[in-house]
Image (cartoon, grey):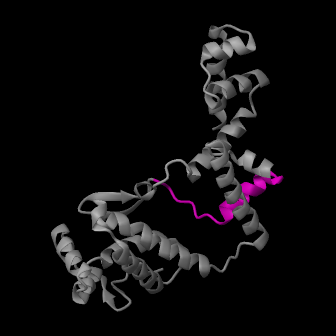
């Protein structure tokens, strides 16, 4: 995709205007009053935002003009739904809207189709995850979800990966007045993330290399919230032994994470 070309969709990207915060505030006031000219000016003043977002999709082999048009749809949706009372910059609100619109376009037009059976497993896994979370007030592990569905854990992971486009939480998606907006800035749910899923899988795999007593100690300490003294009383050894076994187990697990 020729992302470095000057003209996209007939727009000279080298001459795109940049609005100051004060100008945006004034224009938004006029937009709320139904001023169509202000709306058009605001759209033109934020096309650089669309351009910066589509840069991240440069490795998809998609036509830059198509992505730019789709990104503009996301921008317009953001303008129509933005609430000035949110006390956030417009770019912070608009970036995920633009990204979401582009992702939907790529998903709907992707030549590589995910099989229906794999999609069914993924959607069932998401449903089971939500149900178990609500029932236990705690996010289930991938293994627990797989057990509930009576399918191998590997199938659940594969299915979820098939419908997910992973991205680093620390990837910058836009720079506005010197302040970078990262993917993690757009994440509202800090609990139910792909990072937690991958962490759970890594920990589960690493614990397979431990002995039964070490696994039991870590289970009590870090998954059930027991103190070393409580663990010592439960399994019949001293607190010092629990401490030593715990440290040894964690050190051993680091080799596999």
Residue 51 is at least partly visible in this image:
no
Locate residue 218, reporting x and y percent: 67, 26
Residue at 17 percent across and 74 percent down: it is 26
**Location of residue 90 in the rendering, given as x and y in whole percent from the top left corner:** 30, 67
226 or 161, nearer to the observer:
226
* Residue 117 x %, y %: 79, 69
**Which image quarter is the C terminus in?**
top right
In reply to whether residue 207 is colored magenta, the answer given is no
Residue situated furthest bottom in the rendering: 10
Q: What is the span of residues highlighted in magenta in the rendered image? A: 149-169
Residue at figure coordinates x 71%, y 72% from the top left = 114
Decide: is 155 above or below 254: below
Q: In this view of the protein, which residue sits in the foreground, 98 or 210?
A: 98
Residue 188, x across and y down, in percent: 45, 55
As drawn, 138 above or below 172: above
* Residue at 66%, 80% in the rendered image: 111
Q: Which corner quadrant of the image does residue 2 belong to?
A: bottom left
Q: Is residue 217 above or below residue 52?
A: above
Horizontally, residue 225 falls left or right of residue 67, namely: right
Relative to 193, does residue 220 appear above or below in the rendering? above
């Amino acid at each position: 995709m020729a992302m470095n070309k000057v003209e996209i969709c007939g727009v000279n990207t080298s001459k795109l205007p940049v609005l100051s915060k004060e100008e945006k505030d004034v224009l938004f006031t006029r937009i709320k009053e139904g001023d169509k000219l202000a709306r058009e000016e605001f759209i033109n003043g934020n096309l650089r935002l669309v351009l910066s977002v589509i840069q991240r999709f440069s490795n998809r082999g998609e036509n830059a003009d198509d992505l730019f048009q789709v990104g503009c749809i996301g921008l317009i949706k953001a303008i129509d739904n933005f609430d000035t009372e949110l006390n956030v910059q417009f770019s912070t609100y608009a970036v995920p809207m633009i990204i979401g619109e582009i992702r939907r376009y790529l998903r709907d037009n992707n030549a590589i189709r995910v099989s229906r059976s794999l999609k069914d497993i993924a959607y069932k896994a998401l449903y089971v995850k939500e149900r178990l979370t609500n029932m236990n007030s705690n996010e289930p592990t991938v293994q627990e979800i797989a057990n509930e569905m009576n399918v191998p854990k590997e199938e659940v992971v594969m299915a979820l990966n098939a419908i997910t486009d992973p991205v680093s939480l620390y990837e910058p998606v836009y720079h506005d007045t010197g302040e970078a907006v990262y993917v993690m800035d757009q994440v509202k749910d800090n609990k139910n993330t792909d990072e937690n899923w991958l962490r759970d899988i890594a920990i589960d795999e690493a614990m397979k290399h431990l002995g039964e007593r070490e696994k039991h100690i870590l289970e009590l300490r870090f998954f059930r919230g027991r103190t070393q003294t409580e663990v010592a009383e439960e399994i019949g050894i001293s607190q010092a032994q629990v401490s030593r076994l715990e440290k040894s187990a964690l050190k051993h697990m680091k080799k596999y994470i």
